[in-house]
Image (cartoon, coloured by chain):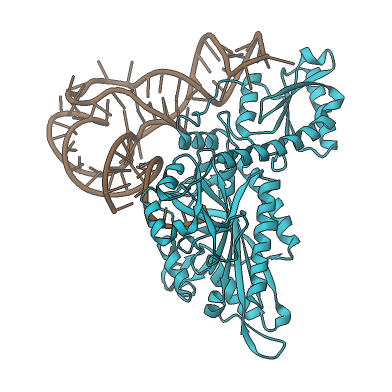
Amino acid sequence: MAQSVLTPQSEDFPRWYQDVVAKGEMADNGPVRGTMVIRPYGWSIWERMQAELDARIKETGAQNAYFPLFIPLSYFQREAEHVEGFSPELAVVTHAGGEELAEPIVVRPTSETVIGEFMAKWIQSYRDLPLLLNQWSNVVRWELRPRLFLRSSEFLWQEGHTAHASYEDANAFATKIHLEVYNDFLENVLAAPTYLGIKPASERFAGAINSMTAEGMMRDGKALQMATSHELGQNFARAFDIYYQSEAGQAELCYTSSWGASTRMVGGLIMLHGDDNGLVVPPRLAPIQVVVIAVRDEPEVNDACDRVAASLKAADVRVRIDHGRGSFGRRVTDWEIKGVPLRVEVGPRDLKEGLVTVVRRDTGAKVTLALDSVAPTAASLLEEIQVDMFEGAKARLAEATHDVANIPEAIEAAETGFARLDWSQVGEAGEAELKVDAVTVRCLQRRDGSMPLNDTEDDLVCIVSKSY
RNA sequence: CGGGGCGUAGCGCAGCUUGGUUAGCGCGCCUGGUUUGGGACCAGGAGGUCCCGGGUUCGAAUCCCGGCGCCCCGACCA
């Protein structure tokens, strides 16, 4: 491997992250503080995430729709906890059309309120339930300290909103989303192992009765919430009059849920799999799975590149040819920073014998292959990389998670990774103690690692760490 | 909001302490040529309201006053 052009992770992890975002041509800071310009390569990764998530969301029966960016301020005030939680970070429009508005308009930070308003209109009968909606949109939260992808003032996400006839149905659906959409995507596409659990009351979504989370561990040992699924109970139904008439003819309040995954996952991808040479994108996610690089810009070499690329494309591999001018080393480094899983090097020396060199991004391992065996081999190599990346991340997560007995030990463990301890050892008082050292309870789990129904279950354990 | 730092070419910076004629350097960019098996080299070239406003001075990137913006570290958070 070449000497890196990035700040090494061990030297300064945040700096390394910024280097990858910049030199991998992922994103730039926008002109307004906290805003983000997503560059074509960064966008292509987000598009892949969207496509994979969207397919899974539709599989659950949810339908896509779109609600407005602007929401009347009064909507937020209808749910006490919701307005309290979001007020500090709202962007509010007070003037439009050259005049001061009679009622300020909020630029949505999330859409429970407007969507609740329309659910109330659309739901009449138990036959209208469940109502399963999802939207892809931008939202705005005026964060105090923005970071590209991880915490931008405006970010992109999908937010699902559903209404159900019973608590059980709402709980089952929110759980289904968490496991069959989010966790399935995280494990099988993003190669991201996480701790699945529920948030303690202090970390719950504003207005929810329960928040499920998937907590991933970044390479610096800090946690990142990759996706969440909330049970809203009847809080929003009550605030927005979401009633249905039951089979027995009674007016009943709905139970609602909401769930979201955002462009933050792109930041998670970078910090979960990246190394000192840049990003490492798991093959099933990668917008470019194989890059075919011409070592020299010569006709025979370029022809061979075209042939190899065509055979890969025929095997449904997402492939890119690079026979641009410029030095070979430069182009290799650039593709490494972008994290393309496999690189095929086509040069005159190997080509005389009908061979090319194939290099794995994750391990750097090289194999020499005959031209016509590249496509079948690449397909299996990509699957191998996908599995190895997930197993590797799983091993790192397990290794950096320490079972501890008390809060001081948990704080110590959180210096380098996660700590797991009995929830009964922590509680609200313990959370305050942890917070002094910037450590938080990331989630509560049952002892076997499964998700509890709620935080009143006995014998729960908690995962604590520093986080993004 | 607290603590630190910074605004000079597209990016990264030097120059400012001790004011002085044409404001430099690296990378990038353009042209031509040689190159290309791990960030190539040579030659030529383009590119600047020195953050903004005021002041001091014969003269301000440099000194003084005021403003604005950005970045990093914390508290808030997908």
The hue used for chain B is: brown
The image quadrant of residue A375 is top right
Q: Picture coordinates of residue A317 (x, y %)?
A: 79, 37
Decide which of A67, A455 is in the foreground and name it: A455
Q: Residue furthest bottom?
A: A249
Q: Answer whether residue A288 is visible to the viewer in this image.
A: no
Check the picture and name the quadrant holding the N terminus of chain A. top right
Left/right placement of residue B63 relative to residue A20 reads left
**Residue at horizontal 38%, vertical 60%?**
A429
The chain coloured cyan carries which letter? A
Q: Examine the rendered structure and indicate whether residue A294 appears above or below residue A387.
A: above
Image location (x, y in percent) of residue A29: 48, 43
Query: Is A297 situated above or below A230?
Result: above
Q: Is residue A160 left or right of residue A316?
A: left
State the image quarter where residue A289 is shown. Answer: top right
Instruction: Please tell me which residue is depicted at 61% across the width and 68% down the height of the picture.
Output: A257
The total of numbered circles placed on residues is 0
